[in-house]
């Protein structure tokens, strides 16, 4: 089964129909139909943080999306752990010349450890690390 990692920009575009990437996500629906998605609690925390200043309706929608993702058998939400933090921090420390966030690094380490090459993201940092960033133009 094909597995794709879902990054923060994907969840933001799912939650917010006015997000510039929402049409990109809609165009990718046939591509991701029937595939397994993987994300992390760190990504979902970053997503909730991003929408926190965008109004009550989007905060409500974001909470609903996070809860639904956790219950969806086609989506694996990996828990935050001290180990995931440390592995992400280790990658972060080796990429000080880049603008990677710690969550990006945790995501990249997770993708590598699971053999995932594709990511629902528009973040060029994933492409810099050799991943296919499916939401990039």
Image (cartoon, helix red, strand yellow):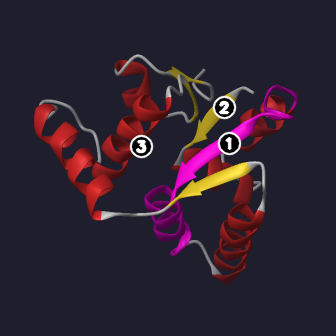
Tally of numbered discs: 3
Which of marks 3 and 1 precedes in the sequence?
1
User: Where 112 sits versus 38, above or below?
Assistant: above
Residue pointed to by mark 3: 107
Which of marks 1 and 2 precedes in the sequence?
2
Residue pointed to by mark 2: 3
Residue 99: percent from the left, percent from the top?
24, 38
> In the current view of this chain or complex, which residue is farthest to the bottom?
56
Asked if residue 52 lies in the magenta stretch, the reply is yes
Q: Is residue 70 left or right of residue 130?
A: right
Task: Choose between 4 and 48: the one closer to the eye.
Answer: 4
Residue 7: percent from the left, percent from the top?
54, 45
Instruction: Give the CA separation, mark 1 to mark 3.
Output: 13 Å
Q: Residues within 10 Å of mark 3 (few under 14, many from 20)?
A: many
Which of marks 2 and 3 precedes in the sequence?
2
Residue pointed to by mark 1: 37
The quadrant of the image that shows the N terminus is top right
Query: Does the CB distance between marks 2 and 1 fall below 8 Å?
Result: yes
Query: Does the CB distance between marks 3 and 2 fall below 8 Å?
Result: no
Instruction: Give the CA separation, mark 3 to mark 2.
Output: 14 Å
Residue 121: percent from the left, percent from the top?
56, 36
Instruction: Give the CA separation, mark 2 to mark 1.
Output: 6 Å
Where disc 2 sits, the SS reads strand
Please state the extent of the stretch shown in magenta in the rendering: 30-53
Residue 116: percent from the left, percent from the top?
53, 28
User: Where 29 sits versus 65, above or below?
Assistant: above
């Amino acid at each position: 089964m094909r597995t794709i990692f879902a990054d923060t920009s994907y969840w933001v575009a799912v939650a917010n129909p006015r997000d510039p990437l929402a049409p990109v996500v809609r165009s990718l629906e046939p591509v991701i139909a029937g595939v397994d998605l993987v994300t992390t609690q760190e990504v979902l925390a970053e997503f909730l943080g991003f929408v926190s200043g965008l109004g009550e309706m989007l905060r409500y929608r974001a909470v609903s999306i996070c809860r639904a993702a956790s219950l969806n058998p086609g989506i694996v939400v990996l828990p935050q752990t001290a180990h995931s933090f440390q592995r992400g921090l280790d990658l972060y420390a080796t990429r000080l010349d880049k603008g990677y966030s710690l969550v990006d690094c945790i995501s990249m380490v997770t993708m590598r450890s699971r053999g995932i090459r594709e990511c629902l993201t528009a973040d060029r940092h994933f492409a810099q690390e050799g991943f296919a960033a499916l939401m990039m133009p």
